Image: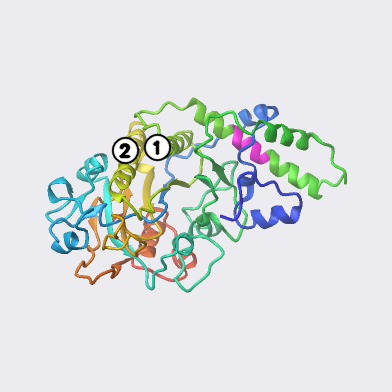
């Protein structure tokens, strides 16, 4: 959020400011000079076969939950959405009253196989409809009137518990998105790492790479191994070694399923490659944008649902073929849902609660929580029935075996999907 992948700190104070927020090596993640090849090849990831991994999938912009999980037996749904409501016979049945968006055929197969769970009507008290603030609340795990400088994953990395990554050469968390996710921000420095999905595999930033290579080779002016120059050089060296290792893994990966060619699916393929390579990284973050559907929603949302569904299914199939599926749980989230009532532009405006998905071979699939009450007045919002921090608490407690109080600030009742 407050850092660019191309940012180059010029002082130790600047570096400490960003590394203190858990960003660390990310600042240099797009650079990889050739002189580091030998040291990269010498750094072989340590194998761990029993670690649990969480893949976070952000649906940026505020996903429309009611057209994602469709209450096709509720007359209020069609009253509120006379033109964009999805017909009962088009919905992919999840139960006698609910169905998935018709573009989600691949996710529907996962649901029928018990590998997809739907957590219904997720939100929080006193919701905020601002994209920025709502994202901040979801990624920090805060109350709506609380400002936290760290993210819930960042605090997970700060705490020493059985699920946290061990200290080695691998990044503790990796994101494949254009910006550093706020959820990674921490009070302590961690080796987080970022890849831009739009530049993976491309020969870009050549001038920047050459500049950094020259910079690292420059003699230190202060001859102090603990001075600013030496500190920054060592940091850049570490970052570049990691970058080179990651690119080597991605370049050599052979997926066991066919991924769609869009950046979202290709990001998930990269995550599968890094997991298959045995990195000790426990958390990955992938983003799919475009969910801010204020106008002409139908076709746009259908394309987004298909992108999400096909990408997730290819990822799960790939993990299963590589016998990695027992280690990985994938979870979606979005900053808010849309208003139940459609607007005059055949779209939907910023709302409150929405469903989210969990996927994996170890989760308990099916429907969890309760569907929203749609007996609403004009422009009235949904009232959530599951707090999003209950989802986080379930992941922390039952997936990572990590006590939740220090990370979430208080206890939340876990859910039954794990």
Mark 2 highlights which residue? 310
Is 382 colored magenta in this rendering? Answer: no
Please name the residue shown 44% across and 47% down the image: 287
Label 1: which secondary element: helix
Question: Dividing the picture into quarters, in which one does residue 413 lie?
Answer: bottom left
Tell me, yes or no, whether the two marked residues, 1 and 2, touch with CB atoms within 8 Å.
Answer: yes
- Disc on the earlier residue, 1 or 2: 1
* Residue 44 visible in the displayed image: no
Q: Is 169 on the left or on the right of 367, as rendered?
A: right
Q: Which residues, given as a range, are shown in magenta?
A: 238-244
Q: Is residue 109 left or right of residue 309?
A: left
* Residue 327 in the image, given as x and y percentages of width and height: 38, 43
Question: Which residue is located at x 84 percent, y 37 percent?
Answer: 219
Reading the image, the residue beneath label 1 is 265
Q: Which mark is residue 131?
A: none
Res 236 seen here: yes
Which of the image's four quarters has the C terminus? Answer: bottom left
Q: Is residue 330 above or below residue 205?
A: below
- 33 to the left or right of 228: left
Instruction: Tell me if residue 165 comes above or below residue 264 in the rendering.
Output: below
Query: Above or below — where is 406 with respect to 198?
Result: below
SS label for mark 2: helix
Q: Residues within 10 Å of mark 2 (few under 14, many from 20)?
A: many
């Amino acid at each position: 959020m407050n850092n660019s992948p191309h940012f180059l700190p010029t002082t130790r104070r600047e570096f400490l400011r960003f590394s203190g927020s858990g960003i660390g090596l990310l600042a240099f993640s797009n650079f990889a000079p050739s002189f580091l090849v030998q040291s990269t090849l010498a750094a072989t990831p340590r194998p761990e076969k029993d670690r649990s991994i969480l893949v976070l999938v952000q649906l940026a912009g505020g996903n429309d939950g009611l057209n994602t999980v469709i209450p096709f037996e509720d007359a209020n749904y069609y009253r509120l959405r006379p033109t964009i409501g999805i017909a009962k016979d088009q919905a992919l049945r999840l139960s006698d009253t609910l169905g998935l968006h018709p573009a989600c055929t691949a996710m529907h197969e996962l649901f029928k196989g018990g590998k997809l769970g739907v957590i219904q009507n997720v939100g929080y008290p006193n919701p905020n409809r601002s994209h920025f603030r709502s994202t901040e609340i979801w990624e920090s795990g805060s109350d709506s009137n609380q400002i936290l400088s760290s993210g819930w994953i960042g605090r997970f990395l700060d705490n020493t518990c059985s699920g946290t990554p061990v200290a080695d050469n691998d990044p503790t968390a990796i994101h494949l998105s254009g910006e550093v996710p706020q959820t990674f921000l921490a009070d302590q420095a961690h080796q987080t790492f970022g890849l831009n999905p739009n530049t993976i595999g491309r020969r870009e930033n050549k001038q920047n790479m050459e500049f950094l290579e020259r910079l690292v080779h420059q003699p230190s002016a202060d001859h102090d191994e603990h001075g600013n120059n030496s500190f920054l050089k060592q940091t850049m060296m570490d970052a570049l070694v990691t970058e080179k290792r990651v690119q080597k893994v991605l370049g050599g990966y052979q997926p066991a399923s066919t991924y769609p060619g869009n950046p979202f699916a290709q990001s998930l393929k990269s995550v599968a490659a890094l997991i298959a390579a045995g990195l000790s990284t426990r958390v990955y973050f992938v983003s799919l944008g475009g969910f801010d559907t204020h106008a002409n929603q139908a076709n746009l949302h259908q394309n987004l649902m298909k992108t999400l569904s096909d990408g997730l299914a290819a990822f799960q199939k790939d993990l299963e073929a590589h016998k990695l599926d027992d280690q990985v749980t994938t979870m979606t989230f979005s900053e808010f849902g849309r208003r139940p009532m459609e607007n005059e532009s055949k779209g939907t405006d910023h709302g409150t609660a929405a469903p989210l998905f969990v996927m994996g071979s170890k989760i308990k699939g099916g429907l969890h929580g309760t569907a929203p009450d749609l007996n609403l007045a004009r422009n009235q919002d949904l009232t959530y029935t599951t707090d999003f921090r209950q989802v986080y608490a379930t992941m922390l407690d039952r997936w990572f075996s990590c006590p939740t109080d220090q990370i979430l600030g208080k206890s939340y009742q876990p859910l039954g999907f794990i």
